[in-house]
Image: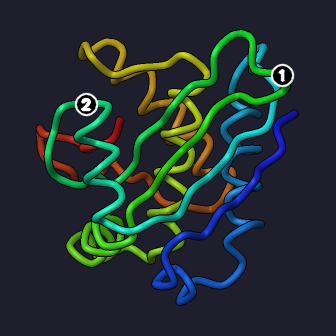
Amino acid sequence: MNAVDLIVEDEAWACLDGKTRLAELAVAAAGAELTGALPGVVAVLLTDDAAMADLNLRFRQKPDPTNVLSFPASEHAANHLGDIALAFGVVMREADERALPLADHLRHLIVHGFLHLQGYDHQSDDEALVMEEIERRALARLGVADPYRNMGDDGMDAE
């Protein structure tokens, strides 16, 4: 069982109602697709592009903002699984470009970030296929369409 601590740092996210419940349901759906999911509190930070660019530079040496970053907690963190940060501008632009509801794209990125906190990655094609299949199943639980059905070879820029 995972709890969600939602932190809204950018006022732009105010355009989306029910953010806490949305995040809780996304984390629960992803957890339901995993056998032996690690329990703990997940902090979800809804921030802006500038803050995300700073995080991306500090932790990945990439100067631009990205849609989502995940930061697994250390093994010694009491009941804290990790943090997921999301950039409003990037997430909104991607949703617009793909003609997706913002809420659905946010659900997808939270599921994606949660899987990283559970130890999943997409560095290889095989790892990416595993992650994408779990994401599809979790999102189907939430009534969200397959986010990969119309994507090109480059997939997502999610970490």
> At 31% from the left edge and 12% from the top edge, which residue is drawn?
126
What is the CA distance from the residue labelled 2 to the residue labelled 1? Answer: 26 Å
Residue 12 % position (x, y)? 46, 84
- Numbered label attached to residue 62: none
Location of the N terminus by quadrant is top right
In screen coordinates, is 25 left or right of 111? right
In screen coordinates, is 48 left or right of 83? left
Pick out the residue farthest to the bottom. 15
Residue 130, image quadrant? top left
Marks 2 and 1 close (CB-CB < 8 Å):
no
> At 67% from the left edge and 46% from the top edge, which residue is drawn?
43
Residue tagged 2: 60
In screen coordinates, is 144 left or right of 122? right
Residue 138, image quadrant? top right
Q: Is residue 133 above or below residue 52?
A: above
Amino acid at the residue labelled 1? Ala
Q: Nearer the viewer, residue 134 or 84?
A: 84
Instruction: Look at the image and name its color scheme.
Output: rainbow
> At 34% from the left edge and 45% from the top edge, which residue is drawn?
55
Location of the C terminus by quadrant is top left
Residue 33, image quadrant? top right
Give neighbour class at mark 2: few <14, some 14-19, many 20+ (Cα, 10 Å).
Answer: few
Disc 1 on helix, strand or loop? Answer: loop
Residue tagged 1: 78
Disc 2 on helix, strand or loop? Answer: helix
Amino acid at the residue labelled 2? Arg
Q: Nearer the viewer, residue 84 or 21?
A: 84
Give neighbour class at mark 1: few <14, some 14-19, many 20+ (Cα, 10 Å).
Answer: few
